[in-house]
Amino acid sequence: DGGITQSPKYLFRKEGQNVTLSCEQNLNHDAMYWYRQDPGQGLRLIYYSQIVNDFQKGDIAEGYSVSREKKESFPLTVTSAQKNPTAFYLCASISRYTSGGRNEQFFGPGTRLTVL
Amino acid sequence: AQSVTQPDIHITVSEGASLELRCNYSYGATPYLFWYVQSPGQGLQLLLKYFSGDTLVQGIKGFEAEFKRSQSSFNLRKPSVHWSDAAEYFCAVGADDMRFGAGTRLTVKP
């Protein structure tokens, strides 16, 4: 089945450590996204990538880094510079050319990161 | 820059009652508009979308939404709510860089 995989579902790290969240899709989508979700704030865009080897900062990119070496993969690294990293992280990808329109995002199940 | 406002943080309705969730957007061009639903600890599922054409769009699970350009709104409606509809609902706008509202949490009373 096609879809988006995020692993692990729950992740715990000590303060000061970098941590990388995985996002893989087999939908052949060109664009991929990372969002952070905190209670009462909805989804905030961290980074997005429209093609391989290219990515753009979203609204809250500070303290995060990404890479896009393969079309299927868009890992997010939460660095020690991120002051409040505990949150629920969602990865998404876009099908640009669905019937009847474009830009319908598909979401992964999310990773809940807790920094102790 | 585009933005989305969902004025209601939390709504409670009785099972069987009608539902309307509000969404207002700011966007420089013709917007692509979406409603998503999220169950606790899960990803988001698309309910419906508007790109162009008929301003009343039908979605899954009996939901519909109406695009009103003059009011910059895209409100979600359902005639009769079921207990399984309890979840968080997000309105979104945009093209390559999507923006989401803060969400409305729906509680359904028996």
Image (tube, coloured by chain):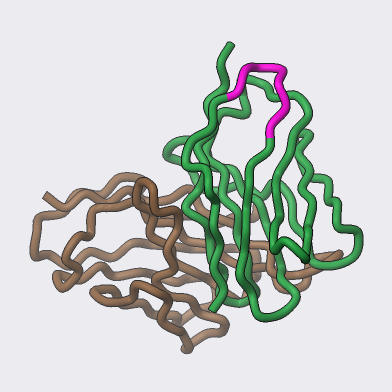
Chain colours: A brown, B green
Name the residue rendered at 64%, 64% in the picture.
A27
Q: Is residue B37 magenta?
A: no
Q: Residue furthest top?
A: B110
Residue B9 seen anywhere in this rendered image of the structure: yes
Residue A69 x %, y %? 44, 82
Residue B19 x %, y %? 69, 32
Residue A7 seen anywhere in this rendered image of the structure: no
Image quarter of the C terminus of chain B: top right
Residue A2 x %, y %? 64, 55
A6 versus B77 height, above or below: below
Q: Residue furthest front?
A: B70
Q: Is residue A82 left or right of residue B60?
A: left
Name the residue rendered at 40%, 74% in the picture.
A59
- Front residue of A53 and B17: B17
Range shown magenta: B13-19
Name the residue rendered at 78%, 59% in the picture.
B68
Total tally of numbered discs in the picture: 0
Q: Is residue A8 left or right of residue A28?
A: left
Q: Residue furthest bottom?
A: A53
Q: Is residue A16 left or right of residue B95?
A: left
Name the residue rendered at 83%, 51% in the picture.
B57
Residue B50 x %, y %? 78, 60
B45 versus A20 height, above or below: above
B105 versus B75 height, above or below: above
Q: Is residue B17 magenta?
A: yes
Image quarter of the N terminus of chain B: bottom right
Specify the quadrant of the image occupied by residue A20: bottom left
Q: Is residue B47 left or right of residue B41?
A: right
Specify the quadrant of the image occupied by residue A37: bottom left
